[in-house]
Image (cartoon, rainbow, N blue to C red):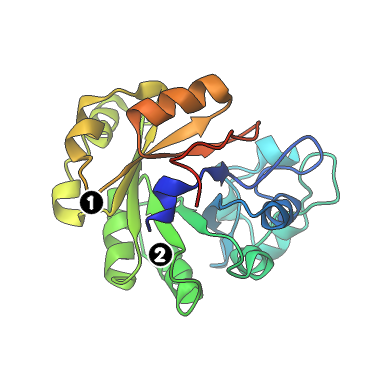
Amino acid sequence: MTWLTRLPVAHRGLHDAVRPENSLAAFRYAVEQGVPVEFDVQLTADGHPVVLHDATTMCMTGTDAPVRDLTLADVTALRLHDTDERVPTLDDVLATIDGRVHAVVDVRRWTIGDDRLERAVADRLRGYDPDTVAQSFDPIAVRRLRRLMPDRAIGQASGSLRSAGPVFRTLGRMMLTNALTRPDYVAFELAELPNRWATFWRTANRPLIAYTVHDETEQRRAGELADGFFFSGYRPFRTEKTVP
Protein backbone atom coordinates (compact mmCIF):
# COMPACT_ATOMS: atom_id res chain seq x y z
CA MET A 1 0.00 0.00 0.00
CA THR A 2 3.00 2.33 0.24
CA TRP A 3 2.42 3.28 -3.40
CA LEU A 4 -0.55 5.42 -2.27
CA THR A 5 1.83 7.84 -0.58
CA ARG A 6 4.36 7.81 -3.45
CA LEU A 7 2.21 8.10 -6.56
CA PRO A 8 -0.63 10.49 -7.44
CA VAL A 9 -3.82 8.61 -8.36
CA ALA A 10 -6.09 9.54 -11.29
CA HIS A 11 -9.57 10.08 -9.83
CA ARG A 12 -12.11 8.08 -11.89
CA GLY A 13 -9.42 7.24 -14.40
CA LEU A 14 -7.22 9.50 -16.52
CA HIS A 15 -10.16 11.25 -18.14
CA ASP A 16 -10.39 14.37 -20.30
CA ALA A 17 -12.62 15.96 -22.93
CA VAL A 18 -12.60 12.87 -25.15
CA ARG A 19 -12.24 10.16 -22.50
CA PRO A 20 -15.15 10.30 -20.00
CA GLU A 21 -14.58 9.61 -16.33
CA ASN A 22 -14.82 5.95 -15.30
CA SER A 23 -14.64 4.86 -18.95
CA LEU A 24 -12.48 2.14 -20.43
CA ALA A 25 -10.83 4.83 -22.57
CA ALA A 26 -9.79 6.69 -19.40
CA PHE A 27 -8.38 3.49 -17.89
CA ARG A 28 -6.56 2.49 -21.08
CA TYR A 29 -4.96 5.94 -21.19
CA ALA A 30 -3.89 5.63 -17.55
CA VAL A 31 -2.25 2.29 -18.32
CA GLU A 32 -0.46 3.84 -21.32
CA GLN A 33 0.81 6.65 -19.11
CA GLY A 34 1.66 4.40 -16.15
CA VAL A 35 -0.69 6.28 -13.80
CA PRO A 36 -2.55 4.58 -10.90
CA VAL A 37 -6.35 4.95 -10.96
CA GLU A 38 -9.32 5.21 -8.64
CA PHE A 39 -12.79 4.17 -9.77
CA ASP A 40 -16.29 3.65 -8.37
CA VAL A 41 -18.28 0.41 -8.21
CA GLN A 42 -21.96 -0.17 -7.49
CA LEU A 43 -24.45 -2.97 -8.04
CA THR A 44 -27.18 -3.35 -10.68
CA ALA A 45 -30.62 -4.75 -9.91
CA ASP A 46 -29.51 -8.20 -11.05
CA GLY A 47 -26.37 -8.20 -8.94
CA HIS A 48 -23.58 -7.14 -11.31
CA PRO A 49 -20.87 -4.64 -10.25
CA VAL A 50 -20.61 -1.73 -12.70
CA VAL A 51 -18.26 1.26 -12.69
CA LEU A 52 -20.21 4.49 -12.23
CA HIS A 53 -19.96 7.18 -9.56
CA ASP A 54 -23.48 8.57 -9.06
CA ALA A 55 -26.47 6.66 -7.72
CA THR A 56 -28.32 7.52 -10.95
CA THR A 57 -27.19 7.44 -14.56
CA MET A 58 -28.29 11.02 -15.33
CA CYS A 59 -24.99 12.91 -15.06
CA MET A 60 -22.95 10.59 -17.26
CA THR A 61 -25.54 9.31 -19.74
CA GLY A 62 -28.45 11.79 -19.82
CA THR A 63 -30.85 8.99 -18.87
CA ASP A 64 -32.25 9.46 -15.37
CA ALA A 65 -32.60 6.15 -13.54
CA PRO A 66 -31.20 4.69 -10.31
CA VAL A 67 -28.46 2.18 -11.10
CA ARG A 68 -29.84 -0.20 -8.48
CA ASP A 69 -33.14 -0.38 -10.42
CA LEU A 70 -31.49 -1.25 -13.76
CA THR A 71 -30.27 -4.60 -15.03
CA LEU A 72 -26.76 -5.11 -16.35
CA ALA A 73 -28.16 -5.06 -19.90
CA ASP A 74 -29.90 -1.74 -19.20
CA VAL A 75 -26.77 -0.10 -17.81
CA THR A 76 -24.29 -1.34 -20.40
CA ALA A 77 -26.62 -0.24 -23.21
CA LEU A 78 -26.08 3.38 -22.11
CA ARG A 79 -23.33 5.58 -23.52
CA LEU A 80 -21.17 8.03 -21.57
CA HIS A 81 -21.83 11.62 -22.67
CA ASP A 82 -21.59 12.01 -26.45
CA THR A 83 -19.10 9.19 -27.00
CA ASP A 84 -19.20 5.54 -27.98
CA GLU A 85 -17.98 4.61 -24.49
CA ARG A 86 -20.44 2.55 -22.46
CA VAL A 87 -20.72 2.11 -18.71
CA PRO A 88 -18.13 -0.60 -17.99
CA THR A 89 -18.42 -3.50 -15.60
CA LEU A 90 -15.88 -4.13 -12.86
CA ASP A 91 -14.71 -7.14 -14.85
CA ASP A 92 -14.12 -4.89 -17.89
CA VAL A 93 -12.03 -2.44 -15.90
CA LEU A 94 -9.92 -5.06 -14.13
CA ALA A 95 -9.25 -6.78 -17.45
CA THR A 96 -8.26 -3.46 -19.03
CA ILE A 97 -5.89 -2.55 -16.21
CA ASP A 98 -4.68 -6.14 -15.83
CA GLY A 99 -2.47 -5.25 -12.88
CA ARG A 100 -0.30 -2.95 -15.02
CA VAL A 101 -1.04 0.07 -12.82
CA HIS A 102 -2.17 0.23 -9.21
CA ALA A 103 -5.86 0.79 -8.49
CA VAL A 104 -8.26 2.00 -5.79
CA VAL A 105 -11.76 0.49 -5.89
CA ASP A 106 -14.33 2.80 -4.26
CA VAL A 107 -17.32 0.73 -3.11
CA ARG A 108 -20.52 2.77 -3.36
CA ARG A 109 -23.35 1.07 -1.53
CA TRP A 110 -26.64 2.99 -1.48
CA THR A 111 -28.67 0.73 0.81
CA ILE A 112 -28.09 -0.74 4.27
CA GLY A 113 -29.19 -4.20 3.19
CA ASP A 114 -27.19 -7.20 2.05
CA ASP A 115 -23.49 -7.57 1.36
CA ARG A 116 -23.74 -8.57 -2.32
CA LEU A 117 -21.67 -5.62 -3.54
CA GLU A 118 -18.82 -6.21 -1.10
CA ARG A 119 -18.82 -9.91 -1.95
CA ALA A 120 -18.83 -9.19 -5.68
CA VAL A 121 -15.81 -6.91 -5.30
CA ALA A 122 -13.97 -9.40 -3.08
CA ASP A 123 -14.68 -12.27 -5.49
CA ARG A 124 -13.18 -10.35 -8.38
CA LEU A 125 -10.15 -9.10 -6.48
CA ARG A 126 -9.30 -12.55 -5.19
CA GLY A 127 -6.06 -13.49 -6.93
CA TYR A 128 -5.80 -10.04 -8.56
CA ASP A 129 -2.88 -7.62 -8.09
CA PRO A 130 -2.32 -7.64 -4.28
CA ASP A 131 -1.48 -3.92 -4.31
CA THR A 132 -5.01 -3.06 -5.47
CA VAL A 133 -6.88 -1.50 -2.54
CA ALA A 134 -10.55 -0.90 -1.76
CA GLN A 135 -12.30 1.88 0.12
CA SER A 136 -15.77 3.16 0.96
CA PHE A 137 -17.53 6.10 2.57
CA ASP A 138 -19.75 3.54 4.30
CA PRO A 139 -18.14 2.12 7.47
CA ILE A 140 -20.35 -0.98 7.23
CA ALA A 141 -18.88 -1.66 3.79
CA VAL A 142 -15.37 -1.01 5.16
CA ARG A 143 -15.93 -3.59 7.90
CA ARG A 144 -17.30 -6.13 5.41
CA LEU A 145 -14.41 -5.56 3.01
CA ARG A 146 -11.95 -5.99 5.86
CA ARG A 147 -13.57 -9.33 6.75
CA LEU A 148 -13.76 -10.54 3.16
CA MET A 149 -10.25 -9.38 2.18
CA PRO A 150 -8.12 -9.50 5.35
CA ASP A 151 -4.86 -9.43 3.39
CA ARG A 152 -5.75 -6.39 1.27
CA ALA A 153 -5.52 -2.73 2.30
CA ILE A 154 -8.93 -1.13 2.99
CA GLY A 155 -9.59 2.59 3.37
CA GLN A 156 -12.25 4.75 5.00
CA ALA A 157 -13.33 7.75 2.89
CA SER A 158 -14.90 10.89 4.32
CA GLY A 159 -15.20 14.63 3.77
CA SER A 160 -17.98 17.20 3.60
CA LEU A 161 -20.64 14.49 3.05
CA ARG A 162 -23.03 17.13 1.71
CA SER A 163 -25.61 14.58 0.53
CA ALA A 164 -25.98 13.07 4.02
CA GLY A 165 -28.34 14.27 6.73
CA PRO A 166 -26.91 16.44 9.54
CA VAL A 167 -26.53 13.56 12.04
CA PHE A 168 -24.91 11.14 9.59
CA ARG A 169 -22.79 13.99 8.20
CA THR A 170 -21.36 14.76 11.64
CA LEU A 171 -20.78 11.10 12.52
CA GLY A 172 -19.28 10.41 9.11
CA ARG A 173 -16.76 13.22 9.46
CA MET A 174 -15.76 12.01 12.92
CA MET A 175 -15.15 8.46 11.62
CA LEU A 176 -15.56 6.99 15.10
CA THR A 177 -16.16 3.59 13.53
CA ASN A 178 -12.46 3.54 12.64
CA ALA A 179 -11.87 2.26 16.17
CA LEU A 180 -13.75 -0.90 15.15
CA THR A 181 -12.99 -1.20 11.42
CA ARG A 182 -9.31 -0.16 11.67
CA PRO A 183 -8.84 1.07 8.09
CA ASP A 184 -5.35 1.00 6.61
CA TYR A 185 -5.71 4.57 5.32
CA VAL A 186 -8.14 7.49 5.35
CA ALA A 187 -9.21 9.30 2.18
CA PHE A 188 -10.47 12.80 2.99
CA GLU A 189 -11.76 15.72 0.93
CA LEU A 190 -8.96 18.23 0.35
CA ALA A 191 -11.35 21.21 0.54
CA GLU A 192 -12.20 20.18 4.12
CA LEU A 193 -8.57 19.93 5.28
CA PRO A 194 -7.18 20.61 7.78
CA ASN A 195 -9.73 18.67 9.79
CA ARG A 196 -9.21 17.63 13.41
CA TRP A 197 -10.72 14.18 12.89
CA ALA A 198 -8.65 13.47 9.81
CA THR A 199 -5.61 14.55 11.82
CA PHE A 200 -6.66 12.37 14.76
CA TRP A 201 -6.94 9.21 12.64
CA ARG A 202 -3.78 9.88 10.64
CA THR A 203 -0.83 7.92 12.00
CA ALA A 204 2.54 6.70 10.81
CA ASN A 205 0.85 3.47 9.74
CA ARG A 206 -2.44 4.99 8.55
CA PRO A 207 -1.75 7.61 5.87
CA LEU A 208 -4.11 10.41 4.93
CA ILE A 209 -4.94 10.60 1.21
CA ALA A 210 -6.50 13.84 -0.06
CA TYR A 211 -9.10 14.10 -2.83
CA THR A 212 -9.51 15.72 -5.34
CA VAL A 213 -6.55 17.84 -6.47
CA HIS A 214 -7.28 19.90 -9.62
CA ASP A 215 -4.18 22.03 -10.15
CA GLU A 216 -0.64 22.67 -8.98
CA THR A 217 -1.74 25.02 -6.18
CA GLU A 218 -3.98 22.33 -4.75
CA GLN A 219 -1.20 19.77 -5.19
CA ARG A 220 1.10 21.88 -3.03
CA ARG A 221 -1.64 22.17 -0.43
CA ALA A 222 -2.20 18.41 -0.47
CA GLY A 223 1.53 17.94 -0.03
CA GLU A 224 1.40 20.03 3.15
CA LEU A 225 -1.76 18.48 4.62
CA ALA A 226 -1.76 14.83 3.49
CA ASP A 227 0.46 11.89 2.62
CA GLY A 228 -0.86 11.33 -0.91
CA PHE A 229 -3.63 12.50 -3.23
CA PHE A 230 -6.12 11.74 -5.98
CA PHE A 231 -6.12 14.16 -8.92
CA SER A 232 -8.38 15.16 -11.81
CA GLY A 233 -8.30 17.62 -14.71
CA TYR A 234 -4.53 18.21 -14.86
CA ARG A 235 -1.26 16.27 -14.76
CA PRO A 236 0.58 16.49 -11.42
CA PHE A 237 4.13 17.73 -11.32
CA ARG A 238 6.69 15.32 -9.90
CA THR A 239 8.15 15.85 -6.46
CA GLU A 240 10.53 13.78 -4.38
CA LYS A 241 7.48 12.48 -2.52
CA THR A 242 5.73 11.20 -5.64
CA VAL A 243 8.61 9.61 -7.49
CA PRO A 244 8.22 5.79 -7.35
Q: Is residue 63 visible?
A: no
Judged left or right of residue 38, residue 113 is: left
Residue furthest bottom as drawn: 127
Please tell me whether mark 1 sits on a helix, a strand or a loop: loop
Q: Residue at x 65, y 31 (%)?
A: 234
Amino acid carrying mark 1 in the image: Asn
Could you say where residue 97 lies in the image, as x and y percent from the top left? 64, 64
Q: Is residue 113 above or below residue 191?
A: below
Q: Which residue is mark 2?
A: 118
Judged left or right of residue 109, residue 90 is: right
Q: Residue at x 73, y 56 (%)?
A: 32
Q: Is residue 77 visible?
A: yes
Please tell me whether mark 2 sits on a helix, a strand or a loop: helix
Q: Which of the two residues, 97 or 106, is positioned nearer the viewer here? A: 97
Q: Which of the two residues, 169 or 18, is positioned nearer the viewer here? A: 18
Residue furthest front as drawn: 240
Q: Quadrant where the N terminus lies?
A: bottom left
Judged left or right of residue 183, residue 226 is: right
Q: Which of the two residues, 225 or 134, is positioned nearer the viewer here? A: 225
Could you say where residue 172 lies in the image, as x and y percent from the top left? 27, 36
Residue furthest left as drawn: 179
Q: Quadrant of residue 59?
A: top right
Numbered mark located on residue 205 in the image: 1
Could you say where residue 19 lies in the image, as x and y percent from the top left? 77, 44
Amino acid carrying mark 2 in the image: Glu
Numbered mark located on residue 196 in the image: none
Task: Judge depth for marks 1 and 2 and give the one in front.
Answer: 1
Q: Residue at x 26, y 53 (%)?
A: 183
Q: Residue at x 70, y 42 (%)?
A: 15
Q: CB atoms at circles 1 and 2 under 8 Å apart?
A: no
Q: Is residue 103 above or below residue 194?
A: below
